Amino acid sequence: MSKKTPIPDTPWSNIQELIDNGGDVSIGDIPPIRSAAVAADENNILAALLRRDGESLIDLLNRLDAALESALTREIYTDEING
């Protein structure tokens, strides 16, 4: 009998929490921005990040998750798109 390996928790628990509770995450070309990540709930944009030159998708997701933690726990919102 083989032993099943448990599925690990996501490394992006704040992104997961937002999506599980009806929020939305958009990543990629968000005109006129060439590459960005935006996370929102039904009422607010919680984080809007510009992808940095040479930044990997993993690094962008890590920054988005950290920005969401600030938004969800301390009501500190990050907006790199609108200033």
Image (spheres, rainbow, N blue to C red):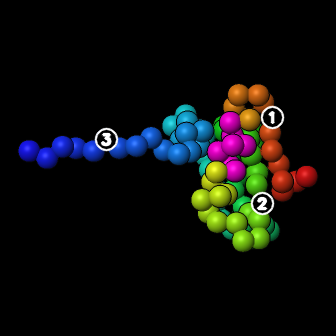
Q: Would you place residue 72 above or below residue 40 in this image?
A: above
Give the percent coordinates (x, y) of residue 56.
64, 66
The residues tagged by marks 1 and 3 sit, at their Cα atoms, a distance apart of 34 Å
Amino acid type, residue under disc 1 in the picture? Ile
Residue at left offset 76%, top offset 51%: 48
Q: Residues within 10 Å of mark 2 (few under 14, many from 20)?
A: some
The residues tagged by marks 2 and 3 sit, at their Cα atoms, a distance apart of 34 Å
In this rendering, which labeled residue sits more in front, label 1 or label 3? Answer: 3
Q: Would you place residue 20 above or below residue 53 in this image?
A: above
Q: Residues within 10 Å of mark 1 (few under 14, many from 20)?
A: some
Q: Please give the residue where the numbered disc 3 appears in the rendered image.
A: 6
The answer to if 35 sits in the magenta stretch is no
Which mark is first along the chain, 3 or 1?
3
Q: Is residue 31 left or right of residue 17?
A: right
Residue range highlighted in magenta: 63-69
Q: Residues within 10 Å of mark 3 (few under 14, many from 20)?
A: few
